[in-house]
Image (cartoon, grey):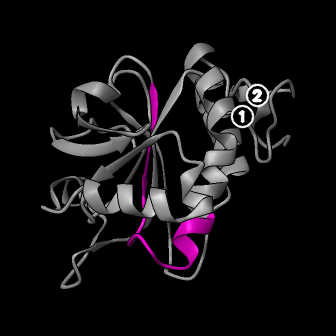
Amino acid sequence: MAVSINTEIKPFTADAFYQGEFVKVSDADLKGKWSVVFFYPADFTFVCPTELGDLADHYEELQKMGVEVYSVSTDTHFTHKAWHDSSETIGKINYYMVGDQTGTITNNFGVMREGQGLADRATFIIDPQGVIQAIEVTAEGIGRDASDLVRKIKAAQYVAAHPGEVCPAKWQEGEATLAPSLDLVGKI
């Protein structure tokens, strides 16, 4: 993988389908707010629409959290529009559907399947400075869960806003956090 936690995203420019329009997006659009870059292998497939639909169901909540979503595949923005227009599940998407037919973004994030021209199932949580805070990559047949993504973003936002505190496993908003110190060593 070409990227890792706490590294800044690399420059890119691409076309996207967004709320009925074709628009340009770039790495600059991801800065100044929290972002999710959600890679998937291809339009008109099987697991992908279930994941994208699940993410669409959580999009309003993510927007309220100050998070923008960019789904990315190596299909074109034209293909994204055709899929959006022909599928009830994909038709409910209001976030950016980025076309990466050159593979620039997919390669920048290190999730291009060698010799296939397709992206892995990969999710990146990016902070307002353009720095990667979380990475999830799953095998072809393993779909992701947007509710867990929301939980991870809340944890990342909490930690960013509260230096010196960390969120334990299964942490949910409003639950106790930890302040790592010598006093905690061996007591958890």
Q: Which image quadrant is residue 25 in?
A: top left
Q: Which residues are magenta?
A: 34-50
- Image height of 188 relative to 139, above or below: above
Picture coordinates of residue 122, whole percent (x, y): 44, 61
Label 2 crowd bin: few (<14), some (14–19), many (20+), radius 10 Å: few
Q: Is residue 155 left or right of residue 84?
A: right
Question: Above or below — where is 19 with respect to 159?
Answer: below
Q: Quadrant of residue 53?
A: bottom right
Q: CA distance from mark 1 to mark 2?
A: 6 Å
Is residue 122 visible to us here? no
Query: What residue would you read off at disc 2?
Result: 178
Q: Identify residue type, mark 1.
A: Cys
Q: Residue at x 44, y 37 (%)?
A: 19
Helix, strand or loop at mark 2: loop
Which numbered tag is attached to residue 129?
none
Q: Residue furthest front?
A: 85
Q: Which residue is mark 1?
A: 167
Rendered view: 162 above or below 28? above
Q: Is 130 a magenta residue?
A: no
Q: Is residue 38 magenta?
A: yes
Q: Residues within 10 Å of mark 1 (few under 14, many from 20)?
A: some
The three-letter code of the residue at mark 2 reads: Leu
Q: Quadrant of the N terminus?
A: bottom left
